[in-house]
Image (cartoon, rainbow, N blue to C red):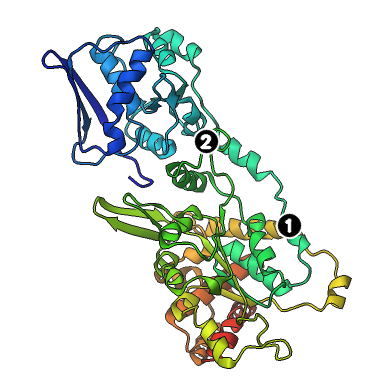
Amino acid sequence: MGIYAYMVQTEVDVSTGLPGFEMVGYLAGEVKEAKERVRVALKNVGIEIPPMRITVNLSPADKRKDGTGFDLPIAVGILGALNRIPIGEWGDTLFIGELGLNGEIKAVRGILPILQEAKRKGFRRCIVPSGNAKEGGVVLGMKVVGVEHISTLLEYLRAPWAKRDALIPPTMLSAEQILQEQNKELLELDFEDILGQFAVKRGAEIAAAGFHNLLILGPPGTGKTMIGKRMPSILPPMSLEESLEVSNIYSAQGLLGPSKVLVATRPFISPHHTISYQALIGGGRIPKPGAISLAHRGVLFLDEFSEFPKPILELLRQPLEDKKVTLSRAYGSYTYPSDFILIAAMNPCPCGYYPDINRCSCTETEVRRYLSRISGPILDRIDLCVEAPAIPLDALSQMSKGESSRQIRERVMQARQMQLERFAGTNYQFNSQIASKDIKRFCSLSLADETMLATLLQKQGASARTYHRVLKVARTIADLNGREQIEKGDLLEALSFRVGEEKYWKGLA
């Protein structure tokens, strides 16, 4: 159901009487069609189903069954009922797979969350299509047997226990090793390609270290998109827990396979501004995860931020605050995680050159209308707002390469380690996740600094949410500086990343 799995028991009864093949249990169309696939597949491997009454029940009967993964357990149930295979020794084994008419066992979606749920329920062996074997093999403690054809499965089921593992060796992979190998891979895009823009790169570093949202404003051609696309190169590597969490989403979408068995690097999703509601948030009769869930634990990069329709952007309010999205349908409610870094890039006006009066051709009304596409509640959920000014060509030609992504990532990793130690025993992983009730515990200030921050934000008319976000950004800056205590300089730097908002939105109000 969505990205979560529940166990279904396939019950088969074969009896004398009027021949027929009935299936019950609140079934979707593709599940009802399984009886024809199973009947023909068994015929084509030499097993004729006698003219008897066959009844198949998929339990629990009050939950709707979707997908084609029920073909294989139905076939195995019929074979057991016809005494073609031993049936008393498979109590801890899960069967799943789609059957082709020639007996081929085809891959299905969602193997990873299904096997994780099966492990929690006490299953120790799983028979899956060979195309899903590697994906399922990362589940520790589960023997995953990949089969390509039903004739191979019959041979396996009829063999003595001692010979089965030799006949089809179980697929068991090390998720930790996959993570380590993929994290060693060098990314093609590197921060050293960006000349100048030190303030923007500093903002990106802070965003990566604390998992903060970032808005970059500036005229065309100043490197906003380049910086956004290079964010994955400085993000801390995913932990095994995070990787499995993200991989469950991709598995449910059918985006994993033999060549990609685990999402080992942080996702980077960059949708076009013409994206639909369903594609962004998720949707459908049984809602599938949208772009914000595919970006979970990674980056959602919205280039040309102001070109997205305002109703689309307003949909981000709740996910940005709650780190999840809940979609309600007639069949139930589905909750998908959506804890991502929002990196947005936009021009400050329709022509792109405001406030340069020598190049900007927009009226003040046009600029105000353009900026008003980004509402106050959305801005309030963005921690860092930084300008990317145009760099003169003569200065650009004299600049040398900047810091590499590897150098920036080392500092990010040090800050990440401080957060791991600080949040040990809590549900937090990054500074951006600190709830308001724990702000004083993790972002304590001296009395003088607290008074200064309250005075400055009060003059700006900032909300309580803004106050907390400034504190969390300052907490990350202190971590990057290797300090446990937040100091005045950290607060002032955090406040400097709200100057862009004051200049463009409140300055034109």
Observer-nearest of 319 and 277: 277
User: Quick one: label 2 or label 1, which is nearer the N terminus?
Assistant: 1
Count neighbours of disc 1 (C-alpha within 10 A) and say few if under 14, some if 14 to 19, many if 20 or more.
Answer: many
Indicate the secondary structure of the residue bearing disc 1: loop
Instruction: Identify the residue at the far left of this view.
Output: 17
Q: Is residue 64 left or right of residue 319?
A: left
Which amino acid, mark 2? Gly
Image quadrant assignment for residue 425: bottom left
Q: Which residue is mark 1?
A: 190
- Name the disc covering residue 108, or none: none
Q: Which residue is mark 2?
A: 257
Q: Is residue 190 above or below residue 8?
A: below
User: Which x, y percent locates residue 377?
Assistant: 44, 77
Indicate the secondary structure of the residue bearing disc 2: loop
Count neighbours of disc 2 (C-alpha within 10 A) and say few if under 14, some if 14 to 19, many if 20 or more.
Answer: many
Which amino acid, mark 1? Asp
**Residue visible at 51% across and 66% down in the picture:** 432
User: Which x, y percent locates residue 498?
Assistant: 58, 80
**Residue visible at 53% across and 40% down in the picture:** 262
User: Which x, y percent locates residue 284?
Assistant: 35, 53
Observer-nearest of 214 and 221: 221
Residue 490, visible in the rendered structure: no
**Residue visible at 47% across and 89% down in the picture:** 461
* Labels 2, 1: front one: 2
Observer-nearest of 360 and 127: 360
